[in-house]
Image: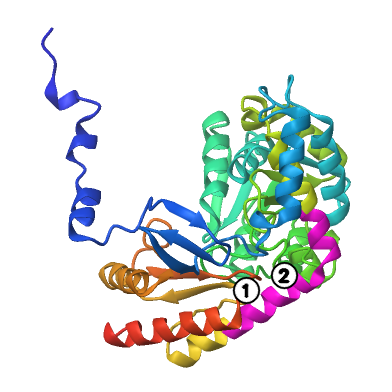
Amino acid sequence: MQTNAGADIFRKCREFGDADRAREEGWYPYFRPIQENRGSRVVIDRRELIMAGSNNYLGLSMDPRVEEAAQAAITKYGTSCSGSRFMNGTFEIHEELEHALAEFVGMEAALCFTTGYQTNLGAISALLGPNDHLLTDKYNHASIMDGIFLASGINRSSLVVRYKHNNIDDLERILGRIPENTSKLIVSDGVFSMEGDIVRLPELKAVAERYGAGVYIDDAHGIGVIGDGGGGVVDYFGDSGLCDLVMCTFSKSFGSIGGFVAGESEVIDYIRHFARPLIFSASMSPPNIAAARVALEIIKSEPERVQRLQAIARKMIDGFASLGFNVGVTETPIVPLHIGDDGKTFSFWKALYEAGVYVNPVISPAVPPTRSLIRTSFMAIHTDDELDEVLEIAGREGRKLGII
């Protein structure tokens, strides 16, 4: 049968050559396999590097207590639940973890998903119905936007507006133009994953109350990171009533994988019955559930870990800034080095990599065009000597490239 070559669905795949060119030129930074994980250091290409690009903020992914709990869960429950939460995939340990999480964040109930990405995808798409309005910060994580896209596909009359980053005046301006009798939900990161700054939550909540809007906070980079007890943004501001729903992933501070959303019991039960990514995905595996459960207890019982992380954040923000790097508005162990040019960003990444420091180069669409950056992120298990070495190498290589 004769085919129309121009209509070949795979044509764009064969014509995509950017990655191959980057590999040939030696600066392709993605999908590099880690051969050994040594906590604050990793082995890649048979070389040991300081890991300055991980979200394992408290270093719990290799904590012996977390590993032991995961192994014990495999022995008791096996490696997989082999079904969705809706059917045969709810284990007793799922519910035990959910009860503990709800108590920790000061909410009535919680619901666990298989990944953090699916948590946002499922919860947002379940909540957003026809003619509902959703207001989202322009710098929110991609999983939030994808939850909105899923909802928009299901309910084509849902209305979405993006407001300027952490700009409460712009948020209020938009809310003032929405009809008073329509349902509204404001969604924001708690800690912004590229900027490292913290949502202005008390002001956001005050505006939300004036206009009758709900507040949904993605605290993936906040829980275990900020607040006296590592409880995230509501702990940081000292009031669990500042949001209606809070979500978090287990792939950061909890050293596992999965995610949860917490809020009023009736709201969580509604999400449980309408979130497609929950209903049509296999549930969190037993070792991941057990790992997250023990990690939660460690966060609660060892606040010194969180305090150490916060001290490291201050050290690295001040250290990079004193070298002349533009660290933006960060307040957390996410310390972006703003460069603004894709070529220089990749050149700086390569120089750091070859000098023994692993970081993450970030370009559009993860950040707006002309705002490319090197994303550094730090863990409570980093030593002062390692942190000083990162600063020394970054300063030396940054000067060579004319970045500072």
- Residue 50 vs 400, above or below: the answer is above
Query: What's the residue type where badge 1 is placed?
Result: Thr
Query: What's the residue type where badge 2 is placed?
Result: Ile
Residue 355 is tagged as: none
Residue 14, percent across and down?
19, 35
Q: Is residue 127 left or right of residue 365?
A: right
Label 1, on which residue?
Answer: 332
Instruction: Residue lying at the far bottom in this picture: please name it.
Output: 322
Q: Earlier in the sequence, mark 1 or mark 2?
A: 2
| Secondary structure state at the residue bearing disc 2 | loop
| Secondary structure state at the residue bearing disc 1 | loop
Label 2, on which residue?
Answer: 226
Residue 201, percent across and down?
72, 67
Residue 317, percent across and down?
56, 82
Give the quadrant of the C terminus: bottom left
Verify whether residue 83 appears in magenta. Answer: no
Choose between 144 and 339: the one closer to the eye. 339
Residue 295 visible within the image: yes
Verify whether residue 298 appears in magenta. Answer: yes
Q: What segment carries the magenta color?
A: 295-315
Choose between 255 and 341: the one closer to the eye. 255
Choose between 227 and 297: the one closer to the eye. 297
Choose between 130 and 318: the one closer to the eye. 318
**Which residue does the image show at 65% across and 56% down from the upper left?**
62
- Residue 181 vs 400, above or below: the answer is above
Residues at badges 1 and 2 in contact (C-beta under 8 Å)?
A: yes
Q: Main secondary structure of the magenta part?
A: helix
Residue 180 visible within the image: no
**Which residue does the image show at 67% across and 74% down from the upper left?**
309
**Which residue does the image show at 40% across and 81% down from the upper left?**
394
